[in-house]
Amino acid sequence: MMKYETVIGIETHVELKTKTKIFCSCSAEFGGEPNSKTCPICAGFPGSLPVVNEKILEYAIRAGLALNCHIQKLNIFDRKSYFYPDLGKGYQISQLKYPIALNGYLDIEVDGKTKRVNINRIHMEEDAGKLIHTSSTISSSESSIVDYNRSSVPLLEIVTEPDISSPKEARAYMEKLRTILQYIDVSDCKMQEGSLRCDANVSVRPFGQKEYGVRSEVKNLNSFKAVQRSLEYEELRKARELEEGVRQIQDTRTWDEEKGLTISMRSKEQADDYRYFQDPDIPPIILDKAWIEDVANKLPELPDARKKRLMQELGLSEYDALGIVADIHMANYFDETLKYTKDAKAISNWLLGDILAWLNNNDVEDIRAFPVEEKNIAQMIELVNEGIISSKLAKTVFEELTKTSKSPQEIIKEKGLEQISDTNQLLDIVQDVINNNPQSVGDYLAGKERAIEFLVGQIMKETKGKANPEIINKLLKEKMS
Amino acid sequence: MYIYNLGVQQLHEKLTNKELSSVEITKAFLEHIKEVESKVQAFVTVCEKEALEQAKKVDEKIQKGETIAPLAGIPGGIKDNICTKGIKTTCSSRMLENFIPPYDASIIEKLKSQDALFIGKTNLDEFAMGMTTETSYFKSTKNPWSLDCVPGGSSGGSVSAVAAGQVAWALGSDTGGSIRQPAAFTGVVGMKPTYGRVSRSGCVPLASSLDQFGPITKNVTDCAHVLNAISGHCPFDANSYQGETPDFTKSLVADVKGMKIGLPKEYFSLYVDKTVKEKVLQAIKQLESLGAQIVEISLPHTDYSAATYSVIASAETASNMSRLDGVKYGYRSPNAKNINDLYVKSRSEGFGKEVKLRVTLGNYFLSADCYEEYYLHAMKIRTLIVNDFQKAFEKVDVIVSPAATTTAFKIGANLPKEELYMSSVLHIPANMAGLPAISIPCGFVENMPVGLQIIGNLLDDSNVIKAAYTYEQNTDFHKQIAPVGGK
């Protein structure tokens, strides 16, 4: 693949989690009986007029600032016309020439390197309703039904420059974008629910060539994994086309998750003419500088800054810090646990190890649903550090913690898991094991350092894992020398 | 004088004096409608039941000794492009022939809160596109002064209903003269308020940046009452004026001493009918004799207004018509085979010729190839037109002109588009600049009414009313009753 290079640009649509829609006071919440959250305005009834929801502006400014954009004071809404049954008015209200934010960036970490992805623009627009067809497409269906609940839910469209060079980077970009949006609390960012959607534009060109290759737009990407997989498929497909001298078509393709391939939907040789013009129903909006500053001051600590803080103040490795800040709730869990123990490294290990594994195994996306309180994790860490329990048995305690509401101390007491550190208690067992395993002793004395592990294991078996490993190591060595 | 010849103010007095009840008044109007409607054809829908119910309610209030608003219990007509909850709102189009809105327009809500009484929905050119009320899908309304003549348009139904004594007041809409021109043709008072003065929420739009909905009445006093009743900030219209609304009845003062009245030379050019011009000039002389100062002014970009309007209005109209697609409400063609067919057939069959013409034209002007050359360009010229007025109003308080270039012409005259087009030059600039403008009766030519137009500065509706009231109080034209209008 060195012969060719890939150029990717991503368009993301973010559903904002405001209470009400962008131009009316219908609820913007997900779900509900079809057409239960509509009104003449969002359903496009005669005479209805749009009035801008101020909260949208605030959320858009937040996003623009968090993505290092320049916030545009002059905002104009435009009408984008096309006919489709999920579009009540026959036009979508969007922003063309005067969007809310321009020229930003976010940084991604891929394979240990940091790369900057530039953001071309962010604009506000309204969502369309939902269509369900009797067949797979509207044109092949006998009938379709439309639900306008989602119509006019507020969206932010975030468009990158074609700075992304690989499917891996594309995925990293989406994950980072989601993290940032999560931090500033403007969206639920759930790809599966559709509150975060992306389309990727990809082209392939001979390495070093200045002109872009012919691009395809890839749609129907419902997970971060799909983003990566679909682009891996596309770059290979396009590279092959170039190799074979096949004429490339600029088209729109849909990703088929099951089959693992993209299918061409329609050719986009000609750009669609949406007949954009300024919406006369919405006066131009001029954002107050003081307001923008106020929003800026209220921004929470963003992931990159938080990562730096964890590294600089707490000495965490970049790898660990990245893992923790990737999800704001995990980062908050970390900070909360830190209130009860100073061992940042241990918290990090637990979070990125057993806790993350538990979440994955139990199909829990959000750590806020994790049943163990932060202070209990902290207590467990302290108990290990104090030598009251071995780190191995801590895992047993952890298991119990996820099932009961008891504290680690209670669990240790109940199950009698206290570590045995009393030399006198252990001496006999150590002697026993030495006596019963002459071969291993012999091996050890002959120079095989590792033979001691077997002996340790035997002692652990005897003590049901409670023997303090450090102490029995010491005793074994003493006894055998 | 019949009850139905009385105006709003007079009827209100009779109600509060308990000389007449609202039921009596309403019955009188309903009777007269039955008498003359077959000749005038002003209504799409007559709401007899609802009107009498409302009349009873108002009478109960009066009996309880409650104070009632000026419009309470007095029959009015609502142009059928204004949404009325539970009552068909057709825009005189096949597309909305059976559309019953589940909501009231904001101004209807406002009127209802003042116990206003609606006796029916009046006829218009289809979706307000036209100047004669002949493009209505249902019928063409007749001019009460001569039943073989047009009442003008697009608010033909509303003006005829007032002129024929079928209602005491009415609402119309004005995008490029659709209140003023028909008011002139039928000898009634018609006013387009300052853009933003009256809420457009729930009113079916023609051209969003040009439309205003306003009063159509027998005299200026009634006009002030209706304007009071419908004006005010509305949170559902983002262009709604947020400042204080004056009490327009306070401007019913017959005094124009020292008022500077501008005569724009471009508006008096050759294409105004000589006899009409004569009457208008007489009216202006009268104002001068009452103490006003006449100042010649120039609005140099007037010549461009028709073309500019054509581009902007058709573009906005085309876009506003997009939601009428047969999917959610309104006419859906029974012959469609797939979704594209559904769109094409529903709109082709649901819309009349004039609507299709403007939608096609408007979409053309907005298309990628044309946008800059036509639409963007027109928007820039619009600014020049606005500036013309700004400069003029530094020198004058109001501007006058004929309210129409001719008197009402015959139905089916099928005047060349050019001619109709050029006649709207009198009206369009006020819409482009959002200025208040009124048409009041100022004479007759061969028994057909002539109108005088008075245009005011932005938000200066009060001065427009004052000037109009002063002229009216010194003449008798507004007291003339059309042959079909009673005695």
Image: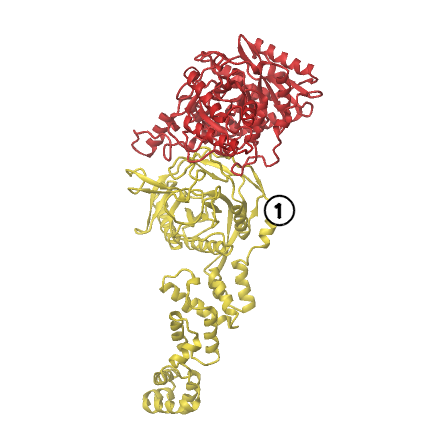
Q: Nearer the viewer, residue B256 or B57?
A: B57
- In the rendered image, residue A296, in percent from the top left (x then y), is placed at 58, 52
Residue named by callout 1? A289
How many marks the image carries: the answer is 1
Callout 1 environment at 10 Å: few (<14), some (14 to 19), or many (20+)? few
Residue B230: x percent and y percent? 54, 31
Taking the image as shown, residue B382 lies to the left or right of residue B364, namely right
Find residue A452 and report its image quarter.
Answer: bottom left
Q: Is residue A446 above or below residue A393?
A: below
Q: Would residue B76 be visible to someone looking at this image?
A: yes
Q: Nearer the viewer, residue A220 or A168?
A: A220
The amino acid beneath tag 1 is Lys
Q: Chain of mark 1?
A: A
Image colour assigned to chain A? yellow
In the image, taking residue A210 as reference, residue A284 lies left or right, namely right
**Residue at the image point whose x is 66% and y is 13% from the top:** B285
Decide if residue B299 is in sight here: no
* Side of A1 where B198 appears, left or right: right
- For the C terminus of chain A, the image quarter is bottom left
Helix or strand or loop: what does disc 1 sit on? helix
Chain B is shown in which shade?
red
